[in-house]
C-alpha cells in the first residue's frame, strides 16, 4: 500500500492527503486501482454490487485535487443516463466538499450532451448549425420514418415489387393489398429505424452501407434496401433542417478531426472517465478516445478510464450498443503492462451486496449460459464459421464475497437465501408471494422488496392481484414503476416561475408561484389569496403597511430572490438556478437538465426568457414532457415498500428481497417473425440487417438471411440470459424464483378479469438447471 507521503503531492495539503489515505484504505483491492490511477488507459470490469460508482467518485475527487483541475482544464465523466449523471455528480461534489474543495474542475455528461457541446461550438466544422436545425429522436412510427419509406418506394419500385412477391405469390388482390400495408406500415419502417441507427452509430455513411451491401447480396438485397432507406433518411434530415442524436456524435467527431479544434478541446480536458461502458457504441468510444488524447502527443495513450460490466449488457438487441467493443477494450488494456508488471485491466470481482448463496446462483447462471448457448454455424457452403468470430454470452468473471472487515460486509441470508418454486399457476404464484411478503415484513418492517418481471402487463397483473393483500397491510406500500406519471410537472413549475419573473405584478402569476413554493415545502401554509391579491403590497410593502409576519416574510424573500435572479443571471442559466432553488432531487435535476437542453436547442441564437417561456408553453399545453426516471432509492427502494418493476428498469438498483416469477420456457426466447411478414420468409428484415452490419464490423461473413437470423437469435438469447443475471444480482438477502405449470400463452392478450384461460407452461431451461444444481433450495 502506498505510504502517506507517496499519496501526498505538492498540489494537496497534508490534511487532504490524510483524507485521501483514509478513503483509499476503505476501498477494496479492485477499487484501489481507480484511486491510484495517474494517467493512461485503464479498463475496469466490475461485477454487480462491486461499488463502482463510489470508487469512480473517489477517483474523480482525488484526480481533481492532485491535478488542481478547474473549469478550463477539467475531468470529463460520461455516463449512460441523465439520472445516473445526476447521481455521480452529487457523489463527486460530496467528496470534494470533504476535501474542502469547491465543486469545480469536472463535468458529468451523457454522451449526447457532450457531443452537442462540442458540435455546437464549431458549426463550421461539425456541419451542425443549430440556429436553423431542429433536433429529433425519431421512433419507428415517427413522421420522418414514414416519409423516408415513401421516398424509397418512389425511387426503387423494382425492389418494392420483389418484396411484394416474397417467397411466393398467387396474384390475389386482397393478399397484395395486405402485403402492401405490412411493408409500408411495419416492415420497411422497422428496417429504416434499425438500419439507420446501426449504420450511423457505427460511423457508416449511406455510401459505406451501399458498398457493404455489394459484399453480402441475398434474394432481396436487404442491405441495399437499408442503404437506400438510409440515403433517403439523410436527405430528408437536410431538407427539413433536422438533426438526430447520432448526428451530434458524428458532428463532434468532425470537429475532432480538425487538428486545431482537437488540440483546443484536449487542452481543456485532463482525462475522461466513462461509466456503463458495456453500453457504448463505436462512435462513442472513438469520440472519447480523441477527447482524452494528450495535446500534441498522439503517440501517448489517452487519459481514459472505461468502467462497465459486459455481463450486464442488456440493451444491445434494441439499441446500437454492443458489449463486444468494451470487451475488446478490456483485451487491449490487458496487453498493456506497466513497469511494475501490473496490467491496465482491473476486474472488480468482490461485491458486498448479496449473500453467498445468491452469488453462487448468479455465478452458476454465468457458467451455465456459456455452456448452453453456442454460436451458430454459417449455413452456406464454404462460408466462414461464426463459431470462430462470435464471443461467448458471458465474460469470464466471478462474483466473490468481500474480505473480512470490509465496510460493506456481505449480508446474512434470509431463510435459505434462495427459494425455487413451482406453483400450479400464476394465481398461486402471486398468493405465494403474498404469504412470503407478509412473513418477511412482519419480521423486518424496515426492509424493502421487489417483484421483477419481463413486461409491464405482468407487472399490472401482479399489482391488481395484490389489491386485497394491500388493504390488509396498509403499512406496506406497493409501488408499480410502470404506472408512474410519465408527464413531468417540472416544465409547468419552471414556466410558472418564469412567467412571474416577467410579470411580478400579476396576481395570477404570483399565486401560481406561491402554490409551487408551498407544495415544495419551501414556505409554510398560509392564505395565498391574501398575499396575491395585491402583489405590490406583498413584494414591496411601504412603511404604512402592517409589519409582515415571519411566515409572510419568508414567502416574500423567496419571491424577491426570483426577481433578482432574472436581472443577474443570463437566460440559459435560469432553469438550472430554478431547479436548485426548488430543491429538486437527483431525478428531477436530470429532468430539468433534459428540459434545458431541449429549450437551448429550440432557442439557439435567440436566447431570452421570453423565447424560453414560448417553448415551455408549447411543451406544457400541447405535448407534455417525459420525465427522467428516478433511479434513486427514494423512489424505487424505499423501506417498507414492495416495488413491482421490469428487469430492465431494475438495473442499478437492489433490494433486501427479490421475487422473480413467470420463468417459462420462452426465457431465453427466440426472435419471432410477425405473421403478416412471413410472406418474405421466416425472418425479420430489420434483424437481418442489424446482424449483417454488426457481422461486417466484426469481420464476419453472413452470406444468407438465414445466417444473419441465426446470429440474431443467438444474440437475443444471450441478452435474455444477461437480463436474468442482472435480475438475480439485485437481491441482497433473499431471492425467490418461480416457474408456473400454467400461465398465459401471450401476456399482452391475457385478461384475467374476463376469465381468460391459462395454458400448460414448461419451465425455463435455466430454472430446471438451477433446480438440479441446488436441489436443497427447491420448495415442494
Image: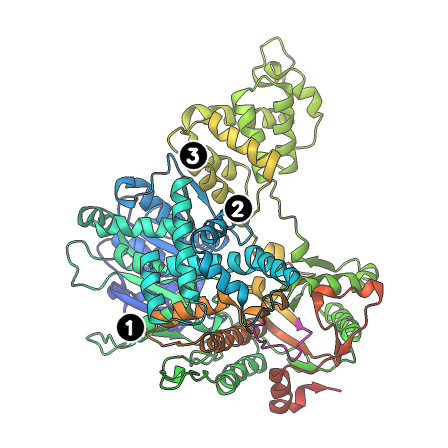
**Which of 212 and 418 lies nearest the eye of the viewer?**
212
**Which of 222 and 766 lies nearest the eye of the viewer?**
222
Q: Mark 3 points at which residue?
A: 573
- Measured from the top left, where is residue 775 in percent x and y? 66, 91
For the rendered model, the colour scheme is rainbow
- Measured from the top left, where is residue 725 in percent x and y? 54, 75
**Marks 2 & 3, CB-CB < 8 Å contact:** no
Residues in magenta? 659-672
**Within the image, what quadrant is residue 241 found in?**
top left
- Determine crowd level at label 1: few under 14, some 14-19, many 20+ residues with C-alpha closer than 10 A: some
Classify mark 2: helix, strand or loop: helix
Q: Mark 1 points at which residue?
A: 333
Query: Magenta part mainly helix, strand or loop?
Result: loop
Residue 283 visible in the picture: yes
Q: Distance between the residues labelled 2 and 3?
A: 33 Å
Q: Which quadrant is home to the N terminus? A: bottom left
Q: Name the residue under label 2.
A: 143
Classify mark 1: helix, strand or loop: helix
In the displayed structure, 142 sits above or below 301; it is: above
Which residue is depicted at the point 49% across and 50% down? 150
Q: Which quadrant is home to the C terminus? A: bottom right
Q: Is 248 on the left-hand or right-hand side of 484? A: left
**Within the image, what quadrant is residue 204 found in?**
bottom left
- Determine crowd level at label 2: few under 14, some 14-19, many 20+ residues with C-alpha closer than 10 A: few
Amino acid at each position: 500500500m502506498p505510504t502517506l507521503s507517496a499519496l501526498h503531492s505538492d498540489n494537496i495539503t497534508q490534511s487532504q492527503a490524510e483524507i485521501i489515505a483514509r478513503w483509499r484504505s476503505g476501498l477494496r483491492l479492485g477499487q484501489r486501482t481507480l484511486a491510484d490511477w495517474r494517467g493512461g488507459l485503464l479498463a475496469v470490469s466490475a461485477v454487480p454490487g462491486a461499488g463502482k460508482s463510489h470508487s469512480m467518485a473517489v477517483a474523480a475527487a482525488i484526480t481533481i485535487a492532485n491535478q488542481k483541475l478547474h473549469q478550463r482544464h477539467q475531468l470529463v465523466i460520461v455516463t449512460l443516463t441523465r439520472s445516473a449523471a445526476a447521481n455521480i455528480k452529487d457523489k463527486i461534489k460530496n467528496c470534494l466538499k470533504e476535501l474542502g474543495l469547491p465543486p469545480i474542475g469536472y463535468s458529468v455528461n451523457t454522451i449526447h450532451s457532450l457531443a452537442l457541446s462540442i458540435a455546437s461550438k464549431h458549426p463550421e466544422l461539425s456541419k451542425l448549425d443549430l440556429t436553423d436545425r431542429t433536433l429529433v429522436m425519431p421512433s419507428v412510427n415517427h413522421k420522418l420514418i414514414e416519409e423516408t419509406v415513401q421516398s424509397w418506394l418512389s425511387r426503387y419500385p423494382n425492389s418494392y415489387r420483389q418484396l411484394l412477391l416474397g417467397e411466393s405469390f398467387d396474384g390475389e388482390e386482397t393478399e397484395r393489398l395486405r402485403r402492401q400495408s405490412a411493408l409500408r406500415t411495419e416492415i420497411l419502417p422497422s428496417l429504416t429505424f434499425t438500419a439507420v441507427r446501426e449504420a450511423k452509430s457505427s460511423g457508416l455513411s449511406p455510401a459505406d452501407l451501399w458498398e457493404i451491401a455489394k459484399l453480402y447480396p441475398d434474394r432481396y438485397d436487404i442491405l441495399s434496401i437499408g442503404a437506400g432507406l438510409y440515403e433517403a433518411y439523410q436527405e430528408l434530415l437536410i431538407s427539413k433542417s433536422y438533426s438526430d442524436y447520432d448526428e451530434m456524435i458524428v458532428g463532434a467527431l468532425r470537429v475532432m478531426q480538425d487538428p486545431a479544434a482537437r488540440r483546443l478541446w484536449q487542452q481543456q480536458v485532463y482525462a475522461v472517465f466513462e461509466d456503463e461502458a458495456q453500453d457504448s457504441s463505436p462512435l462513442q468510444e472513438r469520440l472519447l478516445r480523441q477527447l482524452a488524447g494528450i495535446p500534441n502527443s498522439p503517440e501517448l495513450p489517452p487519459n481514459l478510464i472505461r468502467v462497465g460490466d459486459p455481463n450486464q449488457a442488456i440493451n444491445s438487441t434494441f439499441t446500437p450498443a454492443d458489449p463486444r467493443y468494451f470487451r475488446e477494450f478490456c483485451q487491449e488494456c490487458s496487453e498493456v503492462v506497466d513497469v511494475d508488471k501490473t496490467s491496465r485491466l482491473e476486474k472488480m470481482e468482490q461485491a458486498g451486496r448479496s449473500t453467498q448463496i445468491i452469488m453462487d446462483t448468479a455465478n452458476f447462471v454465468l457458467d451455465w449460459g456459456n455452456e448452453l448457448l453456442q454460436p451458430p454455424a454459417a449455413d452456406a457452403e464454404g462460408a466462414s464459421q461464426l463459431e470462430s468470430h462470435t464471443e461467448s454470452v458471458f465474460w469470464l468473471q466471478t462474483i466473490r464475497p468481500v474480505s473480512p472487515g470490509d465496510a460493506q460486509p456481505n449480508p446474512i441470508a434470509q431463510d435459505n437465501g434462495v427459494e425455487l418454486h413451482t406453483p400450479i399457476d400464476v394465481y398461486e404464484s402471486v398468493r405465494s408471494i403474498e404469504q412470503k411478503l407478509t412473513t418477511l415484513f412482519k419480521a423486518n418492517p424496515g426492509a424493502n422488496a421487489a417483484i421483477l418481471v419481463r413486461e409491464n402487463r405482468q407487472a399490472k397483473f401482479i399489482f391488481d392481484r395484490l389489491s386485497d393483500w394491500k388493504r390488509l397491510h396498509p403499512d406496506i406500500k406497493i409501488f408499480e414503476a410502470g404506472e408512474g406519471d410519465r408527464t413531468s410537472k417540472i416544465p409547468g413549475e419552471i414556466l410558472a416561475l418564469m412567467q412571474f419573473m416577467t410579470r411580478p405584478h400579476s396576481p395570477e402569476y404570483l399565486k401560481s408561484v406561491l402554490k409551487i413554493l408551498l407544495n415544495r415545502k419551501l414556505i409554510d401554509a398560509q392564505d395565498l389569496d391574501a398575499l396575491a391579491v395585491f402583489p405590490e403590497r406583498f413584494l414591496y410593502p411601504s412603511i404604512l403597511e402592517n409589519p409582515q409576519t415571519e411566515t409572510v416574510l419568508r414567502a416574500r424573500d423567496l419571491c424577491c430572490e426570483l426577481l433578482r435572479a432574472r436581472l443577474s443571471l443570463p437566460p440559459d442559466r435560469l432553469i438550472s438556478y430554478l431547479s436548485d432553488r426548488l430543491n429538486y432531487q437527483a431525478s428531477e435535476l436530470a429532468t430539468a437538465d433534459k428540459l434545458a437542453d431541449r429549450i437551448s436547442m429550440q432557442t439557439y441564437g435567440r436566447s431570452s426568457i421570453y423565447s424560453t417561456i414560448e417553448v415551455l408553453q408549447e411543451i406544457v399545453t400541447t405535448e407534455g414532457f417525459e420525465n427522467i426516471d428516478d433511479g434513486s432509492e427514494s423512489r424505487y427502494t424505499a423501506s417498507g415498500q414492495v416495488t413491482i418493476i421490469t428487469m430492465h428498469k431494475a438495473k442499478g438498483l437492489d433490494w433486501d428481497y427479490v421475487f422473480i416469477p413467470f420463468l417459462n420456457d420462452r426465457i431465453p426466447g427466440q426472435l419471432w417473425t410477425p405473421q403478416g411478414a412471413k410472406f418474405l420468409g421466416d425472418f425479420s428484415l430489420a434483424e437481418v440487417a442489424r446482424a449483417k452490419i454488426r457481422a461486417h464490423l466484426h469481420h464476419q461473413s453472413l452470406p444468407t438471411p438465414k445466417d444473419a437470423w441465426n446470429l440474431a437469435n443467438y444474440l437475443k438469447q444471450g441478452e435474455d440470459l444477461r437480463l436474468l443475471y442482472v435480475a438475480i444480482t439485485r437481491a441482497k438477502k433473499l431471492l425467490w424464483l418461480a416457474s408456473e405449470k400454467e400461465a398465459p400463452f401471450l401476456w399482452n392478450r391475457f385478461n384475467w378479469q374476463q376469465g381468460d384461460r391459462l395454458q400448460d407452461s414448461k419451465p425455463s431451461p435455466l430454472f430446471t438447471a438451477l433446480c438440479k444444481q441446488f436441489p436443497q433450495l427447491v420448495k415442494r
